Amino acid sequence: SVSADKREFRLIVLKPSCMGDVPSIYISPSSGRTTPGYTAISYCWGEPSTEHFSHPLRTTLYHSLQDCRHATLPTVLWIDAICIIQTDI
């Protein structure tokens, strides 16, 4: 049997904001039982971002975050570059 903590995965919540603002996110664990609807984004190409952000991102992903955020509602995302802990096999 797999323990509950092994079934958890991470989702990104992109906070609502106005165009031109730096995207703001937080990581939210999900158990799979109460998972909200989310959009999956996979990015592994592009130049490293020179933007100020809490997590190192490729420029293409940074611009995607700017484009997909909503003005008044949070946007729930699964982004492989952030949600997968690359050092945890």
Image (cartoon, grey):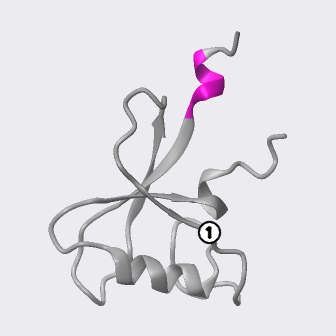
Q: Residue at x 40, y 37 (%)?
A: 35
The answer to which of 48 and 7 lies nearer the viewer is: 7
Q: Which residues are magenta?
A: 4-8
Residue picked out by circle 1: 42
Percent position of residue 15, x then y: 30, 63
Image check: 29 left or right of 80? left
Name the main secondary structure of what is drawn in magenta.
helix
How many numbered badges does the structure rendering display?
Answer: 1
Quadrant of the rendering where the C terminus is positioned: top right
Percent position of residue 83, x then y: 60, 52
Q: Assess whether residue 7 is covered by the magenta stretch.
A: yes
Q: Residue at x 54, y 44 (%)?
A: 10
Percent position of residue 79, x then y: 56, 61
Tell me if mark 1 has few (under 14), some (14-19) or many (20+) residues whose alpha carbon lies within 10 angstroms of its own.
few
Quadrant of the rendering where the N terminus is positioned: top right
Q: Say above or below: 77 vs 7.
A: below
| Quarter of image, res 82 | bottom right
Q: Residue at x 72, y 83 (%)?
A: 45
- For badge 1, the amino acid type reads Ser
Q: Assess whether residue 6 is covered by the magenta stretch.
A: yes
In this view, the residue farthest toward the left is: 72
Percent position of residue 55, x then y: 58, 66
Image check: 59 left or right of 85? left
Q: Residue at x 34, y 43 (%)?
A: 36
Q: Secondary structure at mark 1?
A: loop
Q: Say above or below: 31 vs 29.
A: above
Q: Say above or below: 13 vs 4.
A: below
